[in-house]
Image (cartoon, grey):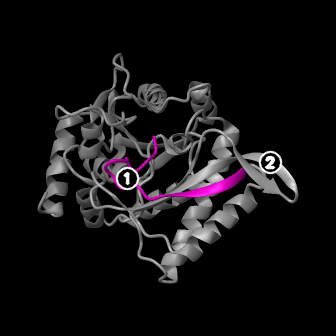
Amino acid sequence: MNDPAQFVADALVRLRAEVPGKAIVAASGGIDSTVAALLTERALGERARAIFVDTGLLREKEVDRVSDLFRQAGLRFEVVTAADRFFATLEGVGDPEEKRRRIGAAFIRLFEAEAERFGTDRLVQGTIAPDWIESGGALRDTIKTHHNVGGVPADSKLRLVEPLRDLYKDEVRAVARELGIPSPDRQPFPGPGLAVRVAGPVTPDRIRRVRVANAVVEEEIDRAVAERAMRPPWQYFAVLLPGLTVGVQGDNRVHGEAVSVRVVDSVDAMTATAAELPRPVAQRIAERITRSLHGEVVRVLYDVTDKPPATIEWE
């Protein structure tokens, strides 16, 4: 894509051709789905309905943050609360691929019901090139099943519309700037949410822990960037690791979980480099996480692996 303005003009024409009636849009608040949602609304007007699902797997204050973003972007939207549905579908599941498939299926079943209520069979998604490439497209191996690609059940009656399918993240951000969407360079957040930042089984308690840890990482990195102690990274977050590790409280031995901190730089999400984390920032993160999750998390690690060989998210 060389010209974002031309892409927007062409996308509006394509959307009107692909959607003769109404459409719902899966709008997570990420830059990809926000661009797709705003393009759809501009193309279809009141025939479009953006749906933001509170899965219970979101970051701290994410519902408020996304709602504010949509209002600033001038996007009409609805919030659907479905935490019970997603925790139920993930009960007892530890395998990363199975998590993604189940989350994708849960989204689709929810959107099927919402589409029927709205009188349509069209679902607009913010799928971009890395999503389908890593899901096994273009004659490649499946690196990881993206919930909005391989997680779509084969028997779904929804017709998917993907206006950003051939774009990479940097190109999507250029389109976002063209559309006037606030904060187009904000860090990505995975569609399956914190479920893929909890290695192993997903429970409400483990999601709570990783949500606290993730908030600490974001706050301390944002603080370091504001103080010019480091450059703004592409993405930064916490992962709750499986199993227990030994810790100390006073004179007592305790068993708690461990958290890994991941900070990377990238351009298009196809490759990434582990970023340098200043020692004082790392210490503040470790101290705050272990203090906030007293006795629950007793060890904080730092991930220095590039992509490849690792992916950006752990799962």
Give, as a single range, the part of the protein colored magenta: 297-315
In primary-sequence order, the first of circles 2 and 1 is 1
Which label was assigned to residue 34?
A: 1
Occupied quadrant, residue 86: top right
Residue at x 62%, y 63% (from the top left corner): 216
Q: Is disc 2 surrounded by few (<14), some (14 to 19) or many (20+) residues within 10 Å? A: some
Image coordinates of residue 266 in percent, x first then y, are 32, 61
Residue at x 66%, y 42% (from the top left corner): 206
Return the residue at label 2: 254
Specify whether 144 is left or right of 194. left
Q: Element under label 1?
A: helix
Helix, strand or loop for the magenta stretch, by majority: loop
Which label was assigned to residue 192?
A: none
Task: Determine the CA span between mark 2 and mark 1.
Answer: 44 Å
Asked whether 309 falls inside the magenta stretch, the response is: yes
Name the residue nearer the viewer: 139 or 309: 309
